[in-house]
Amino acid sequence: MLIYGVSFDLVGKQPIVLLKTADGNKFLPIWIGHPEAAAILMKLQSQAPPRPMTHDLLSDMLEQLEAQIVRITVTELRENTFYAQITVQQDGREIEVDARPSDAIALAIRAEAPIFAADGVIEESAIEFEGEDVDQDQLDAEVAKFRHFLDEVTPEDFAVENGEDD
């Protein structure tokens, strides 16, 4: 899977990370939290915080422990919640760690680790943009709009002020 971008659900104003299959036109939307969206977006835009954020800290700790993130996998969708695993390698052995997909993706970006999704997750939840029913001009226009949004959005757009009810 490739990270296609981070956007907002226009109805609930909830951030969404959009993953795309590497060999097709299937997209997997995963609703995530505002802090995780900011962490993903900062790294996608090659921005660095003045002090390490949680995902940077964990990535640095793994490096100091001579452990590498080998891959992350979105493993299942259960009761409208996605689940993921982070595969870490240390001293020649692999360790599987349960994680939220948003945290796993934020770490995968930092470690430059590949992102996978189980076939069942893609079959159940992915959106496919191909076939005769798709208007290519309309699809190109939507992709251009989304890319423009990605060019303009900043991590601060995902900040939630204390006491705000959403």
Image (cartoon, helix red, strand yellow):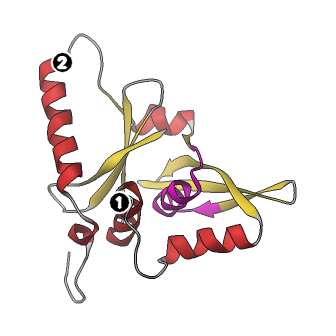
**Nearest the camera: 102 or 66?**
66
| Mark 1 element type | helix
| Mark 2 element type | helix
Residue type (three-letter) at the residue carrying disc 2 = Gln
Residue 99 in the figure: left or right of residue 91: left
Q: Give the residues drawn in magenta, as a range.
A: 98-114
Residue 57 in the figure: left or right of residue 25: right
Q: Quadrant of the C terminus?
A: bottom left
Q: Position of residue 27 (x, y in %)?
A: 37, 36
Q: Is residue 100 rendered magenta in the image?
A: yes
Q: Nearest to the eye among marks 1 and 2: give it.
A: 1
Residue tagged 1: 41
Residue tagged 2: 136
The residue positioned farthest toward the right in the image shown: 92
**Nearest the camera: 134 or 89?**
89
| Residue sitting at x 21%, y 50% | 151
Tell me which corner region of the image, top left, top right, bottom left or bottom right, holds residue 25: top left
Residue type (three-letter) at the residue carrying disc 1 = Leu
**Dominant secondary structure of the residues highlighted in magenta in the image:** helix
Q: Is residue 19 visible?
A: yes
In contact (CB < 8 Å): disc 1 and disc 2:
no
